[in-house]
Amino acid sequence: MVDCWEFNPCVKLTLFWIFPKLLVVLLTKLTIFAAIVFNKFFLVTIKPMIMIVKVLIADDNHLFREILATLFKYSSDIEIIAQAEDELEVLDKVLSSRPDIVLMDVSMPRLNGIDTTMALHKKFPEIKTIALTAYDEKTYIKGMFDAGACGYLLKSCKFDQLVEAIMQVYNGKKYISDDVSEIIIQDYLGQNSREAVKLPKLTERESEVLKLLAEGTSVREISDRLFISIKTVGTHKKNIFDKLEFENMAQLIKFALKNGIVPFI
């Protein structure tokens, strides 16, 4: 019996030439289709998970802004998308670029960093602010946090610390650098020490009179408010000056501000 596989040329042509060609074409199309599906569904799904924190630098020192922007060029997580040198430019750039974080200097022309942060927080509450400044006084630290800032660090910090601050604030946490924390702690301890030494010397009524005098209240107004005579107010005032060794009202006001009896204006 004759083997048809051996002698039929059509069978040979189909098996050894046409079928392999069709198989190659089919495999090529399947590969292209798989690549399209992978790119469309897998990559598009993964891409949004790679979050880049968008940052605006607000500082009146042009050189400082440029150096900072250059450093962040090598960061895979943080991108400097805009720069501003004063309050008006900050609000304008924030509106157009919508950053996640604003690095805010305390000292800027026209409007300082505290007032700018307050305006920014009121207008764009979703955008977070970190103070990056050379000022290490308690007044500025408290002022920035009261205005709505989420972090505070000094320009003397390391680059890694700044990156850490940005990422922590972006993730919903507060950030205070170690040196700023030390300032706050020392001020707190010093304030407690001053109060322990000086304030207990005063009676409760004298403390009330001291606060009212420091706030600029007149002797007659104090008399009316505390329901005591003008002469009694004068006696309390004299006792305050004697006990705390004041020579004038300027020293009284300075003492009240330093000890937190009245707030900074």
Image (cartoon, grey):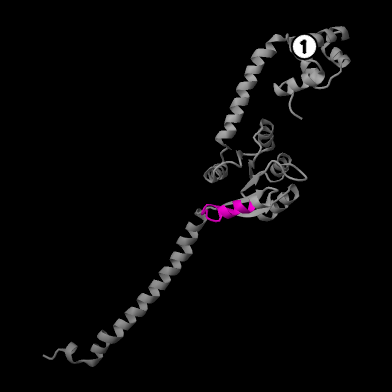
**Apparent side of residue 29 relative to residue 75 in the rendered image (left or right):** left
Does any portion of residue 234 appear in the rendered image? yes
Location of residue 72 with respect to 136 vertically, above or below: below
The spot of residue 138 in percent (x, y) is: 66, 31
The spot of residue 159 in percent (x, y) is: 54, 46
Question: Observer-nearest residue: 117 or 30?
Answer: 117
Q: Quadrant of the N terminus?
A: bottom left
Question: Observer-nearest residue: 148 or 37?
Answer: 148
Location of residue 55 with respect to 142 vertically, above or below: below
Query: Looking at the image, which residue is at 66% across and 16% down?
Result: 195
The spot of residue 190 in percent (x, y) is: 63, 21
Quarter of the figure with residue 172: top right
In the picture of the structure, the residue carrying the numbered disc 1 is: 240
Magenta highlight range? 65-79
Query: Looking at the image, which residue is at 50% across and 58% down?
Result: 47
Q: Quadrant of the C terminus?
A: top right
Does any portion of residue 126 appear in the rendered image? no
Give the amino acid type for the residue marked by disc 1 in the picture: Ile
Query: Looking at the image, which residue is at 40% across and 75% down?
Result: 29
Direction left: furthest residue: 1
Quarter of the figure with residue 140: top right
Location of residue 177 with respect to 159 vertically, above or below: above
Q: Based on the picture, tell me whether residue 141 belongs to the magenta stretch.
A: no
Q: Based on the picture, tell me whether residue 76 belongs to the magenta stretch.
A: yes
Question: Observer-nearest residue: 190 or 29?
Answer: 190
Question: Observer-nearest residue: 122 or 16?
Answer: 122
**Apparent side of residue 67 relative to residue 247 in the rendered image (left or right):** left
Quarter of the figure with residue 225: top right
Label 1 neighbour load within 10 Å: few <14, some 14-19, many 20+: many
